Image (cartoon, rainbow, N blue to C red):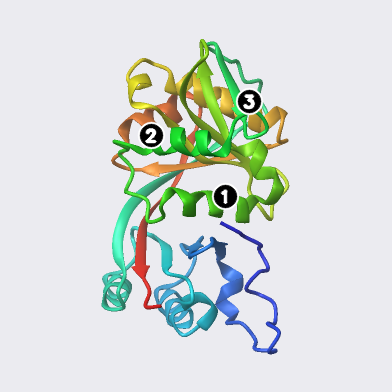
Amino acid sequence: MEYSPNLFNQKRKDDKMEHPLYASVKFVKGGNSITVEDTEELKVKEFIELVQALLNDSEITAAKYLTILADRRLSEEAGEYLRGNGFMIHDEVQFVVNDLQNEIEEEGNFSLKSLAEVKEDTFKEIWRQTMEGSLNAPQSLNMNEQMKSVKKELGSSYIDTCNIAYEKGEPVGVVMPHIEPGTNEEGRFFYFGLLKEARGKKKSAPLYRKGLKILKETFGAAYSIGATSVRNKPMLKVFEKTGCKKTKRVHVYKRIQKQ
């Protein structure tokens, strides 16, 4: 997914001015998808006006998938408007933040290998397997589309982001740290997950902590933003164990657009 904070706030080549509310939210653009975040400060009328603008914007509707993250306390009027325009609630997600200023102590004996050391097909297969049985809502994009989104959002740095985690020489999952595009020090994980055979063995929190350490020491992040489905209780416990603090909880609305 490709994001620039000014991506939709500038004039296009045809000199068409963008809607003023575009400057109030964040756009994340993937190869065939667009996600709109940070809408929770909008009033109901503003939110509906934003959605109207999005659905009348040819650049937005050219993407197959349109996702909007909306405050779960959004009024019924706005919810009905979304549903009436082809949006469905895809998931409910909890966001967290982790201050990385303090020293991060590692546990376990994990090592990471990036795409500089492993083949892309190998990485994609391990990544695919970590998604099996996930408690998060199913991904709209297939694995090739997912990989394309990583490359578009992160540019050449995707090579350092895509990591297979190993323990005693055996793969246990994937860790995908990066700096959020458009920021200098906001760390995120494009994805974090364990293989089925590695779950339930108290590996998640130590591996996540290693990822946080890499975000801080290798990527230069000052803090980390994380998110997971409210149904994903194991991941919520990982957040708690690694010092993350809850921030906001949102509904994820998705719309498959006519092509």
How busy is the neighbourhood of tag 1: few (under 14 within 10 Å), some, or many (20 plus)? many
Name the residue carrying label 1: 150
Q: Nearer the viewer, residue 190 or 100?
A: 190
Amino acid carrying label 1: it is Val
Q: Could you say where residue 64 lies in the image, as x and y percent from the top left?
A: 42, 69
Name the residue carrying label 3: 213
Name the residue carrying label 2: 129
Q: Is residue 191 above or below residue 204?
A: below
How busy is the neighbourhood of tag 2: few (under 14 within 10 Å), some, or many (20 plus)? some
Q: Nearer the viewer, residue 101 or 152?
A: 152
Q: Could you say where residue 204 lies in the image, as x and y percent from the top left?
A: 43, 23
Q: Dot 2 lies on which element?
A: helix
Amino acid carrying label 2: it is Gln
Q: Is residue 216 visible?
A: yes
Q: Could you say where residue 151 lies in the image, as x and y percent from the top left?
A: 61, 51
Q: Upstream in the sequence, badge 1 or badge 3?
A: 1
Locate the N terminus and report the quarter of the image it occupies: bottom right
Residue at coordinates 73% horizontally, 35% vertically from top-left?
A: 220
User: Foreground mark, 1 or 2?
Assistant: 2
Whether tag 1 and tag 3 are in contact, CB under 8 A, the answer is no
Amino acid carrying label 3: it is Lys
Quarter location, residue 105? top right
